[in-house]
Image (spheres, rainbow, N blue to C red):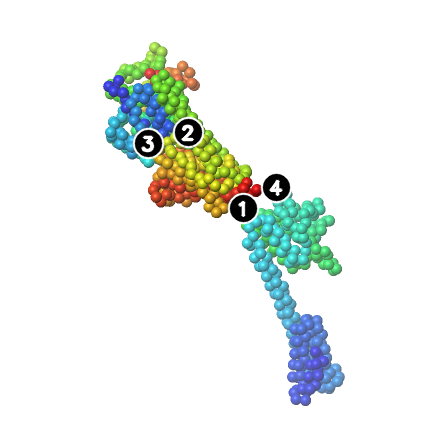
Amino acid sequence: MAPHAPRILVVDDEPAIRRFLNSALTADGYSVTQAEDGRTALAAIQRDKPDLLIIDLGLPDLDGQDLIREVRGASDVPIIILSVRDDEAGKVSALDNGADDYVVKPFGVDELLARVRAALRHRIQQQGHDPIIRCGHLEIDLARRLVRCRGDSLKLSKKEFDLLRTLAEHAGKVVTHQQLLVRVWGEAHRHDNEYLRVYVRQLRAKIEADPHQPAYLLTEPGVGYRLKFDD
Amino acid sequence: MVALACGLGLVVDAWIHPPNISMVFLAAVLYSAIRHGLRPSLFASLLSTLLYNVLFLEPRYSLTIDDPSNVVALVFLLIVAILTSDLTGRLKREAAAAKVHAEANAALYEFSGKIAGIGRLDDLVWAAAHQLATMLEAQVVILLPAADKLRIACGYPPEDRLSAADHESATQAWIEGRATGIDTAFADGVRWLFVPMKSDRGPVGAIGLSRSRGDDAGPVFSPADRRLIDALADQTAVAIERIELAREMETARLAAETERLRVALLGAISHDFRTPLASIIGSASSLRSLWDRFDAETRTALLDTIREESERLNRFVGNVLEMTKLEAGRLTVNLGPTDLADVISTTMAEMARGMVQHKVELAAPPDLPLANLDPLLCRQIFVNLLDNAAKFAPAESKICVRLRADGDKIVVDIVDEGPGIPAEHLGGIFDRFFRVGSGDRRRAGTGLGLAICRGFVEAMGGTIAARNRVDRPGAVFTVTFPAASVRTPRMME
């Protein structure tokens, strides 16, 4: 754990949204600061050095995308985007610009808190290099390239393992189609979404109890995939 | 005329040679050709030749001719006289034809001039029927298709039904694109002549003409009439097509406008309805999940958020519904003498909870006349105006509502201490879906509130305008309503 209560900066122009985010995050043990627009947010980042940013894509002064780029230029602080449905392109470009995850408005607070935990944990993980990721019944040993499901070891092809590993490294967070394709198949296959469709189906057949109702490997429509992580 | 020439010839006989006297007869023939046409001039030619022979050629007073050269002269006189008659007659006929042609052209020109400026189909067919009836001295009906069947669009003198045979004949003219009815091969039991109206795009309709048959057995409408009718039918067809094209363009424009409204409405719903929903769902789920970890004050604050945002959402929904009503022209306005100050103070009380961050003041003279208003529409106007002021003016600032009478009008000023309205936006602020800022970066709101205000105010015969304060930053919205022209209780005593 971090030595202090993680600091979260909430950037949203809607006071009602800030109000409940502040209440919920504070109650969940975080230290919360608020900003109502991009400029205030940039100043607050400089001043408070938050451990995580929650940014609404629709801000009155700055484009949320610009804010993400600007933040990413200077730091790798985790960023969670608040977005609306129907804006898959906006989500994808936010993720490409360096955001770590997104939550679609309207959202329940549990969903947001889970995303916050995943984003903060990933950061801790990156620092600690935990070689084994446990995810419900799933156990992934990154160093030994082993996967166990409910205690049984699974036989995965190389690409299947690479795909699962990429998702597991970002467990609980969304990984875009392009990020997966580039990591597993290489830059040349950046747009070969059908590879993903096939391999995700194969992987689900091996790790899911019911491949048609996946409990671990979840689809984020129009954006990518997410390996569910219960903590 | 020949007698006159004859007399003149006898007079000049003393001075000139007989062959030259034939010129005098020739002049007579020419004159009668010009004046009376071919037949009289031919007759004059023969008569002149005869008289010239009898009276002036030796031996005089007999049909015999001594000098063979005089025979030649006589024959030439006859030939020249006949040729002249014919030429002159032809010239005269052509002049007459040209005159008819010019008249027809003038009539067509006048007709096209009369129907060119007409923008409504009803007016056009009426004008065309009237013109045709006047020019051809006939009864006229104009038939246009409606739902694949010809219907009488207009009749002059007014006529609204045709016999089945007539109607069938008209339909045939329309579909087959040729004249039917009287004077044509398709005349069985038909009282009318029907000519088709055609344009480049296809059949437009049919024109029916009828007049009583003259004494002679000739056609009811002469070939000249028919040419005129065809030309007029063409012009009417073009004019009708012009109007229909204009109407199609208008329909397309309206469809595009409706589409634009639909897209904007969807945008408003997807962005602006989700904002309060996000606050409501977020607050409710926070209470559900973290109830034990919240203190009492936080719980109350979250519950207040849920209620305020629900009310905001309710106003949005109301605005969209009102806008839809305004758009569809289904707004019902119940005007009546109303105490505007009462309406506004009630509205302010209703909104007080959502406006705790602002100080709202109402100032009205005690003797303010009643206004002629629909109180429900009026309430909606001030909900939107106060909501708008509260949205832009900072917390703790003052929003003043001032009422006054100005002549036969009641004036309401809503004055805030916000940033004011950017000058370039003052003109468009009452337009639908207008919002200061664009894209996703705008204040929450459907962009309908002020448009609805204008719609409602205008529906009640009032005006609404926005300007910026001069004394300090801030916006002023001014609404005027007509004062009620009813007798006040005191005047009724």
Specify whether residue B395 is in view.
yes
Name the residue located 65 percent from the left edge and 57 percent from the top edge.
B134
Task: Report the residue marked by disc 1.
Answer: B247
Q: Which percent across, then down, holds residue B248?
A: 53, 45
Q: Amino acid at mark 4?
A: Ala
Compare residues B136 and B337 and report the one nearer the observer: B337
Which image quarter: residue B357? Answer: top left
> Disc 4 or 1, which lies upstream in sequence?
4
| Label 2 residue SS | helix
Q: Which percent across, then down, holds residue A118?
A: 32, 21
> Disc 2 or 4, which lies upstream in sequence?
4
Q: Are marks 3 and 2 on the same chain?
A: no
Single out the mark in the foreground, 2 or 1. Answer: 2
Location of residue B107 with respect to B429 vertically, above or below: below
Label 4 environment density (alpha carbons within 10 Å; few <14, some 14–19, many ≥20)? few
Task: Report the residue marked by disc 3.
Answer: A36
Single out the mark in the foreground, 1 or 3. Answer: 3
Q: Residue furthest bottom?
A: B14
**Which chain's residue wears label 3?**
A
Q: Which percent across, then down, holds residue B87?
A: 64, 71
Task: Report the residue marked by disc 2.
Answer: B353
C-alpha span from label 3 to label 4: 60 Å
Single out the mark in the foreground, 2 or 4. Answer: 2
| Label 4 residue SS | loop
C-alpha span from label 2 to label 4: 58 Å
Q: Amino acid at mark 3?
A: Glu
Name the residue located 58 percent from the left edge and 49 percent from the top edge.
B121
> Disc 2 or 1, which lies upstream in sequence?
1
**Which chain's residue wears label 4?**
B
